[in-house]
Amino acid sequence: MSKPARPRGSPSIGDFLPLLQRDSLGYFYGRERSGDLLAAILQEDTPLLILGAVGTGKTILLASVLRQLYDANGPERLQVTFIDPDRGLAPLFESRPQTCKVAVRERDFMDALALPLEEAGRPGGPYQLLLVDEMMWLAPHGPFQEQWSRFQEILVRLAGDEDLRQRVGIVAASIIGTQEINARFPTTIYIPQDFPLSLQQQLEGEPWLGDLVRKHRQGKFFIKRRGQDYRLFRAPFFSMLGPSVPDLLWEL
């Protein structure tokens, strides 16, 4: 059976790699309405929170960001720690040398939360990225009461230490959240499609943002927000052309 043709006007991640800044941990989210690429740098764009309903593209967006970072940076520049109990993301990357740890069981979460900060203390070491897919797994319950407070402590520490943010970053996806926790993430991506009611209620204090989310509930645009600034962009999608790590494409 022949491979499906690549959609016209949809270059693969490999086509984008030459555009990434080699002296920084850069990546592309997707394309803005104008068709321009929406770019970012880990040191400037994290902690990053991605909010949206189940099945709306949070994990695929994370996979596209990681695919670029892994392909453009070796283990001497980047190490990634995963908290991924559903194993929707980590299996694509766990065999790569940049992957430092994959925590699937809740009893391993505390070690995974501690590891990036410990590794960041090594002089000249690689940038440490903590990837949490899905943040609700850190909520306290049963015997696991400390992981949520520890996660918040890390966010607070990053907020108050610019030097540490140059060495450690957090990217988390969630279907839940609170105004207090969300405020600790300087950058947030909202996925308007089927936006959960619980998250809509958090936007009541910012009518402009709530109106923007409702306006695009039926569309394909994601909303990247940093402070009062926002960008609309089309996120990537999986193609059937890739090998063990599927290729990701952007619609124009």
Image: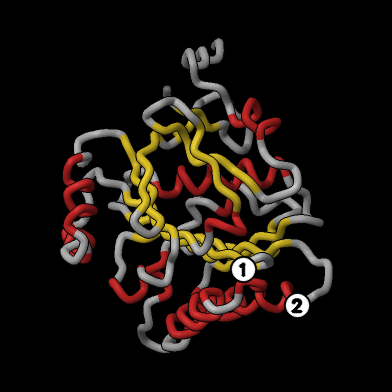
The reply to whether residue 116 is visible in this rendering is no
Label 1 Cα crowd, 10 Å radius (few <14 / some 14-19 / many 20+): many
Q: Which residue corresponds to the image point at 32% horizontal and 44% vertical from the top-left? A: 56
**Disc 2: which residue:** 121
Q: Is residue 172 left or right of residue 220?
A: right
* Rendered-image quadrant of the N terminus: top right
Mark 1 element type = helix
Instruction: Give the percent coordinates (x, y) of residue 242.
Output: 59, 29
Report x, y in % for residue 205. 19, 66
> Taking 235 as reference, is 27 left or right?
right
Which residue sits at x=21%, y=61%? Answer: 206
Mark identifier at residue 165: 1
Q: Amino acid at mark 2?
A: Gly
Q: Any mark on residue 91, and which?
A: none
Which percent across, then down, holds residue 124? Answer: 83, 67
Give the quarter of the image for residue 114: bottom right
Three-letter code, disc 1: Arg
Report the residue at 60% width, 50% height from top.
Answer: 41
Cα distance, mark 1 to mark 2? 12 Å
Q: Nearer the viewer, residue 2 or 122?
A: 122
Decide which of tag 1 and tag 2 comes sooner along the chain.
Answer: 2
Viewer-closest of 108 and 233: 233
